[in-house]
Every structure is written in structure tokens, then in C-alpha cells.
């Protein structure tokens, strides 16, 4: 193998593929990046068996070939190499010779014979802008369980409704749903992408302009752009029938400004207990909405919030963190809070945006 390419392009690619490498003692080749020099480009591959990636870097290929190099060494090296715009690579006695204007480096290679194949996914196909897919998945993924005990809720659930893709995640304490309208009607079965993989998918697709092609098979999903091919394992399981827990009616409703609500929650959290508990006292008959927090070691606080209130009086306890997380998904200035009695979830919706819905269960304390 012998080639030349831009040092900046190789740096950018290695920053992404390094995240996908695995730390597997029984299969050490997973900690490496596979270099495949072919045609007019260098392909860098990495996988941890749950997720795999191939990035294509433009290169001047003088001699085709394949070699595997430890990812941590590559990342450390290219994080400090600078100055030259061009770097050359050549495989010499099963090692990789790296040359810049100022440096001559030999990197020990790893046998590439055991490097897993990154599967080519051929199945249901969806084409949409990378920004739309990211908007959908980023709006909900933080609500998934980080535990792998119940894989079906440790995932982001994606399913179609005609020309809408619905993204949902829950950890059983809160639930986020985001609907993204697209230009084609879809009919694929719902899929579950593991939470850990969604984090990496977001990192890889962020900054990509234009469309991404998504292919689905029973146990795999792939994302393709002009220079990136990414695959992820899909969970074999059933997502809970979450629509059953969404209240059909509302007994109490509050409309308020998002920023005022956020500020009030942050003040209350200073005085919350070790469970992050804050108490909502809503009294439409008195036009009062207050958030209360008490901590025996710090003190207590009551914050009044302005807004339009209607319906029955209600008092509920919530985990502050579960509420504050959702604001990363909301661009609207105003919010609607809906309640349906004690021990029932709160529904939070942005005013003027019917595509997002957030549900938070109250604390039974």
C-alpha cells in the first residue's frame, strides 16, 4: 500500500472513526482502524460489533493495499502532527511508514485477517436530510434508559405514520415524542436503536449537509452519505404501547413563558433534596402557580410563575432533572402544561409546534 492525502482530511476522519473502535480483550483487532487503499480513495473502517463505520478520504493511491493500525496510536499521532498539508503512507514489512516534511514514523500494524466485515444493508430505504433525522433523534434520545437491563426502553424507537417519522424514547419516568414530516410515505416496521449507538450516530451525522440514505433490515440499520457509511445493530424487542399512558383529557392547564419556567425551576433546584424533588402547586381558582422546594440542610424556596391557568387545583411532585432535560428540544417561547389529576403524568407541549410532546411522571413522595 502506498498513498498520499491531506493531513487535515485524515485527521478529521480519524477523529470520527476512533469513537467507533471497540475495547475487546478477546478480539484486539477491534481496537484498530482498518485502512483500505483502493481506486482513488482511502477507506478507514472501525467497528465495536454494535456499530460500524467506513469513512472515505480522497487520496492519491500509488499502490492498493490493506493494513490495520491501533486507533489510539493514530489519534495521538495525528492530534499533534501539524504544518504539512500532505502526508504519505506506505506499508513496509507489514508496518505503516508515515512521512511528512519533518517527520518519518513507523507504526506497528495488527493482523487484519480477523477484522469483522461491516455489513451492507439492503432493505427498506428512506432518503431525508441529515438535519431532519438529527432533529428527530436529538429531540428524544436523552429520555431513553441508560441501563441495558431492559433493552427495549434503553433505545430510541422509530416508526412511520404515512409521511411522518415518529421518534420516541422513555426510561419509564419520562417520555419524549418527536414527529418529522418527510416527502415520502413509509411502511417499514418500527425499529429500536440502542441508546449508546444513538449517541455515536449523532456525533457522526452532525455537520453533514444534504441528504442521508437510510436502509433497514431486520437486525441492522445503515446511514450513507457521499463519504460516510455507518451501520448500527437494532434491538430485537417491542417498545411499550406508550400511547396508553397519555391522558386523553386534561383537568388542569397552564400556559406560560418557557424562559420564566426554566429560571424558576433552576432557582427551585438549589433548594431541592437528594431526589431533585420540586413541588408544583397549581390553583387556577386563585390564579396561582408556584414551585416549591425544601432541603433540610439548605433551606426552602417558593417561586411564583405568571401564566394563564384553568381547571382544577392540583399539587404534584416532580424530579427537576426530568423536566429540565426537554428544553433542548423546544425552540418555542411559550409552553402548555396539561394535568389530569394526582398521580397522573404532566404533558408538556410547545405552543405552535404540534410535532413535539413530553410526558413526565410525578414522584410518589
Image (cartoon, rainbow, N blue to C red):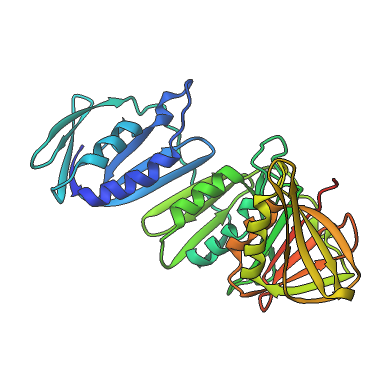
Which of the image's four quarters has the N terminus? top left
Q: Quadrant of residue 112?
A: top left
Q: Describe residue 308's horizontal placement relative to residue 95 as left or right.
A: right
Residue 26 point in image, percent of width and height? 48, 20
* Point 58% across, 71% down: residue: 331
Q: Describe residue 340's horizontal placement relative to residue 201 as left or right.
A: right
Which of the image's four quarters has the C terminus? top right
Residue sitting at the far left: 101
Q: Describe residue 89's horizontal placement relative to residue 30 as left or right.
A: left
Residue 364 in view here: yes
Q: Nearer the viewer, residue 106 or 311?
A: 311
* Point 77% across, 64% down: residue: 290
Q: Nearer the viewer, residue 177 or 34?
A: 177
User: Is residue 45 depicted above or below 180 in this figure?
Assistant: above
Residue 250 in view here: no
Residue 317 point in image, percent of width and height? 81, 53
User: Is residue 316 depicted above or below 128 in this figure?
Assistant: above
Residue 361 point in image, percent of width and height? 79, 53
User: Is residue 291 depicted above or below 6 in this figure?
Assistant: below
User: Is residue 260 depicted above or below 241 in this figure?
Assistant: below
Amino acid at each position: 500500500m502506498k498513498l498520499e492525502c491531506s493531513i487535515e482530511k485524515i485527521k478529521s476522519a480519524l477523529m470520527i472513526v476512533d469513537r467507533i473502535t471497540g475495547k475487546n480483550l478477546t478480539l484486539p483487532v477491534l481496537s484498530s482502524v482498518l485502512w483500505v487503499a483502493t481506486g482513488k480513495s482511502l477507506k478507514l473502517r472501525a467497528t465495536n460489533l454494535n456499530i460500524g463505520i467506513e469513512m472515505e478520504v480522497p487520496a492519491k493511491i500509488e499502490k492498493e493495499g490493506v493494513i490495520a493500525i491501533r486507533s489510539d496510536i493514530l489519534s495521538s499521532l495525528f492530534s499533534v502532527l501539524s504544518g504539512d498539508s500532505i502526508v504519505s503512507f506506505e506499508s513496509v514489512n507489514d508496518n505503516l511508514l508515515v512521512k511528512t516534511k519533518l517527520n518519518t514514523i513507523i507504526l506497528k500494524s495488527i493482523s487484519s485477517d480477523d477484522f469483522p466485515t461491516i455489513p451492507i444493508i439492503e432493505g427498506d430505504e428512506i432518503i431525508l436530510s441529515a438535519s431532519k433525522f438529527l432533529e428527530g433523534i436529538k429531540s428524544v434520545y436523552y429520555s431513553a434508559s441508560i441501563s441495558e437491563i431492559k433493552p427495549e426502553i434503553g433505545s430510541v424507537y422509530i416508526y412511520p405514520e404515512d409521511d411522518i417519522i415518529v421518534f420516541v424514547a422513555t426510561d419509564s419516568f419520562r417520555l419524549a415524542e418527536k414527529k418529522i414530516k418527510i416527502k415520502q410515505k413509509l411502511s417499514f416496521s418500527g425499529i429500536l436503536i440502542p441508546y449508546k449507538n444513538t449517541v455515536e450516530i449523532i456525533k457522526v451525522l452532525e455537520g453533514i449537509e444534504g441528504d442521508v440514505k437510510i436502509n433497514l433490515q431486520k437486525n441492522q440499520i445503515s446511514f450513507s452519505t457521499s463519504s460516510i457509511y455507518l451501520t448500527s445493530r437494532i434491538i430485537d424487542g417491542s417498545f411499550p404501547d406508550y400511547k396508553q399512558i397519555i391522558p386523553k383529557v386534561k383537568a388542569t392547564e397552564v400556559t406560560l413563558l418557557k424562559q420564566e419556567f426554566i429560571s424558576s425551576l433552576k432557582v427551585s433546584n438549589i433548594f431541592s433534596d437528594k431526589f431533585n424533588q420540586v413541588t408544583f402547586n397549581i390553583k387556577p381558582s386563585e390564579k396561582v402557580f408556584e414551585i416549591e422546594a425544601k432541603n433540610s440542610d439548605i433551606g426552602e424556596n417558593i417561586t411564583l410563575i405568571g401564566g394563564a391557568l384553568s381547571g382544577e387545583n392540583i399539587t404534584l411532585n416532580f424530579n427537576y432533572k426530568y423536566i429540565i432535560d426537554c428544553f433542548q428540544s423546544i425552540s418555542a417561547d411559550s409552553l402548555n402544561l396539561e394535568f389530569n389529576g394526582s398521580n397522573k403524568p404532566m404533558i408538556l407541549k410547545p405552543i405552535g409546534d404540534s410535532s413535539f410532546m413530553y410526558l413526565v411522571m410525578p414522584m410518589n413522595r
